[in-house]
Amino acid sequence: MAVDKPTLTLGPVLYLWEGEKWRDFYFRMADEAPVSHVVIGETVCSKRLHFADPYFPLVIERLVAAGKRIVLSTLALVTLERESQYVRSLIADSPYPVEANDLSALALLEGEPHWIGPLVNVYNAAAARVLAMRGARIICLPPELPASSIDEIVSQTPGVDFEVLAFGRMPLAISARCAHARAKGHIKDNCRFVCKDDPDGLPVKTLDRQSFLALNGVQTVSFTCQALLAELQDLVASGVGRFRLSPQDCDMVAVARLYDEVLQGRVEAEDGVARLRQIYPATPLSNGFHHGKEGAAWVARARNIAHGANA
Amino acid sequence: MEFPRPLAAPLAAVPIPLIDRAVKLMFKSLLRRHPGLFERLGEHKSKRYAFRPTDLPLVFLVEPARAAVSVMRKPADPAADAVVESPLFLLLALLEGRCDAEGLFFSRSLTVIGDMEAVLSLRNALDGCEIDLPRDLCAFAGPLAPLVSRTADALRRRVLAGEHAAWN
Amino acid sequence: MELICPAGTPAAFREAVEAGADAVYCGFRDETNARNFPGLNFSREELGEATAYARRKGTKTFVALNTFMRAGHEDLWYQAAADAVHLGADALILADIGLMAHAAETYPEQRLHVSVQASASNPDALNFLVEAFGAKRVVLPRTLTISDIARLARQIRCEIEVFVFGGLCVMAEGRCSLSSYATGKSPNMNGVCSPASHVRYRQDGSDLVSELGAYTINRFPRDEAAGYPTLCKGRFDIADASGYAFEDPVSLDVMDQIDALREAGVSALKIEGRQRGKAYVAEVVSALRKALDARPEERRALLARLRLLSEGQRTTSGAYDKRWR
C-alpha cells in the first residue's frame, strides 16, 4: 500500500567525528535539513562514547527545538560487560525511542515501542512479525535485501513502518577485531583512536588498485555509496514510508534536500543522480543489492553497468 | 611423490589410441560401480574438465554429460571449462578422496585454472562416492583382476606413505 | 565436553562417526544451510540413512538450517525443518528468528540450537533466545575471549558450544555482507561466502592471482602457499601499504586450551569444515578425539600434524586470545 507522505530519517554518524565537528554537523542538520527523524548515538565502537558525551545535551536540544524527532541508537556489537551495561542503562533512561542494533537491545526493549536498525537481521516477514509482536514499530531493513524481499516483507507485516537505506556507504561487516587500528600498527585495546583521522572511512584497495571497501574502526563499509533515487517511487508504492540517509563526510544538507526534492517529485531521479555525484564526487554510487546483484554494482535504469573496478 | 621417470618415459612412445582405449575401459568400469557420481554435479555436469598430470606427457579430458573420457598427448590443450594440474598420484588420491584437496591446494601441489565451482563440485561429488581404485578397477581387469588390484594397492600404499613422509 | 564434527557428504558423515564424534552436523542440499556448495550436502534420503546410522552408533545428528529465509519462499525452510524433525535430527541449528519462532511453535519437543550465524554474543541476547524460543544451546561467535565465555556462561540459561578448529571468520558471523557486495551471493541469503562460482585464479608472470568477482583478492609469488580467495582473508592496499587487512590466511586452533574452555563452562567443542573432504574430517576428528581424551601434556604432539591440513598452514587462537583484537 503506497504511503501518503514519505519522510527522511538521518541515520547515526557511523564514523568517529571529533566533538566539535560532530556537534556542528548536527546543529546544521537541525537548522537546515528536511529530515523528520534523527537517529543519534554511537553505533560502532564503545570505546568512542566519550567523544560526543559533552556535546550530546546541546545537540539534542537543538534538534528538538528544530522539530526533529529523536531516536537513540545502540551498539551493533555488544561483547563486553561494560557494553551490556551501557545498552541497559541507555534503554532504561532514554526519554526517546531507542533503535536496536543487536539482539541484546532487542531483548531489553520488549514491550516498549522501539525501532529496529539495519544491522539486525530481518530477511523475511516471519522475523519482522516476531519483532512487531515484541514492540517494534519501525524497522530499517538490512541493505543487503533485494527489492523483491522488501516488497514481500512490507506487504506481509501489518502494523510496522518500514525504512530503507537510501544514501550512504553500506555497513557490510563488524568484527571484534579492529582492522582500522591494525592497518595503522595498533591493536584495538591500544588503538589511539586512529579512526578519527578518517572521517569518511579508510579506503581499502585491491592489490590491483581497485577501490573496494573502507574501514571504520571495527566496522567495514562499502567503498561505494548506496544511492536509491530512481527506486524511491517504486518503494513508496510498495509501502516503504521512510528513507534513511547515513551521514558521510560531505554536504549532508544538500543530500537531504536532494532526496526530499526527488521524493516530492520536484526533481527527476536521473537529474538527482547527476546532482548527487556532484555533492559527493569522490565516491562511486551503487544500488546493486536493491536490484539483486552484487552490492557494488550500479544499475542505471534497466541497464546494468557493473561498478568499474577503477571507478 | 612424482610418477617414476623410468615409467613415465615409455608413455611418450606408446600410441595414444592404446592408452585412450585402456583409460576409457577403466572409466566405464568406474562409472558402472558409481552410477550416481556425475548426478551429484548438478548444473556442472555439462562442463568439460581437463586433468594435466605434471609428471606425465598426457592430458585427460573428462566430459560428464557424455560420460566420456579422452586422452591426448601434450602439448595438446583441449578446450575445457576447468583445468586441474598436479602429479598423477595426487590426482588419483583425490579421485579416491584420500587426500584433502584444500590442504593440497594451499601447499600449491595442485593448481586449478578456470571454473573453480565446477572443480569444487566434482571434488565434492568424488568425495561423496567412496571410490576404491584397486577394488573398482578389478572389474575392468577381468582374469588379471587380482594382479591389477594387488599392484594398484601396493602403489597406493607407497604413494600415501610418501605423502605422509612429506607432511611430517 | 562433546565433540561436534562436520559432514558435507554421507561419506564424511560415516568417517566422523567412526572417528569418534559425539555429534555430527550437516545440512540439506540447498540454500537452507550456510555451506550451500555444489556437490555437497544431503538429500532427504541420505539424511535419513545418516541419522539412522548415527543412532545405531550412539552418535547424535544436528541439522543446520542456518541461513535466513528468503522473503516469500519461507516454505523451503519450513519444509526443511519438518523433514529434519521427521528424519530424526537430534537438534536443529537455527539462525533466523522467524524460523526459530516457527520451529518452537510447530515442534515444541524438538531441541533447538542457536547457530553462530545468529550472532548472539552476550547474556541479554542469549537469554532472549532461550526465553522466546526455548533454545537449549548456543554456538558462540568467534569474537569472544575465553574469559568472555566464562563470564557469559555464568549468566545464561543454556549450554555453550564453541569452535575450536578449522576456518576462522574474522567478522561477526551472520552479519557480514562482504561476499554479496562483491558477488551478489551471501552467507545469510545464499549459504555461501566468496562462492567458487565467482572465483578465478590466473597466472600473472610468476604470480598466482586469485580473484573474486571483479576484485583481486590475493597475489602469491611462486612457492608461497596459496589460499582460497575468501574475501576477509585477502591481501589489500591500505594507504599504500599492502597486507592482510583483516586476517592472515590462518585457521583456528584452540585445542591447547581445552581445559580452560572446560573450566569456562563450555559443553561442546565444534570443528568447522563441512566443505572439507572426508579425508580431512577423518583425520581431524580422530586427532581431536584422541587429544580430548589424552592428558594435557600429551596433546601437543597429537595435534601438531593437524596444522598441515590448515589453510596457509598456520593456525591462530583467534579472538579467544585478547591480543588478537
Image (cartoon, coloured by chain):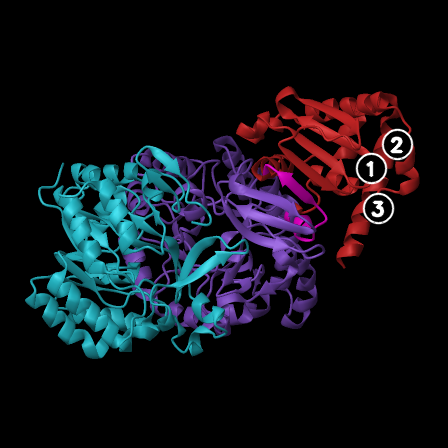
Chain colours: A cyan, B red, C purple
Q: Position of residue C297 (x, y in %)?
A: 66, 72
Q: Is residue B106 magenta?
A: yes
On screen, residue A191 versus residue C22, left or right, reads left
Q: Are marks 1 and 2 in contact (CB under 8 Å)?
A: yes
Q: Amino acid at mark 2?
A: Leu
- Name the residue rendered at 47%, 44% in the picture: C192
For label 3, the SS is helix
Q: Residue at x 58, y 60 (%)?
A: C250
The segment highlighted magenta reads B102-115
* Tag 3–tag 2 contact (CB < 8 Å): no
**Could you say where residue A52 lies in the image, as x and y percent from the top left?**
24, 75
Q: What residue did someone put label 2 on?
A: B11
For residue A126: magenta?
no
In which quadrant of the rendered view does residue A181 lie?
Answer: bottom left
Say few, some or many: other residues with alpha carbon within 10 Å of mark 3 (under 14 / 14 to 19 / 20 or more).
few
Q: Which mark is residue B56?
A: 1
Tell which circle, 3 or 2, labels the residue nearer the N-terminal end. 2
Label 3 and label 2: CA atoms lie apart by 21 Å
Q: Which mark is residue B158?
A: 3
Give SS at disc 2.
Answer: helix
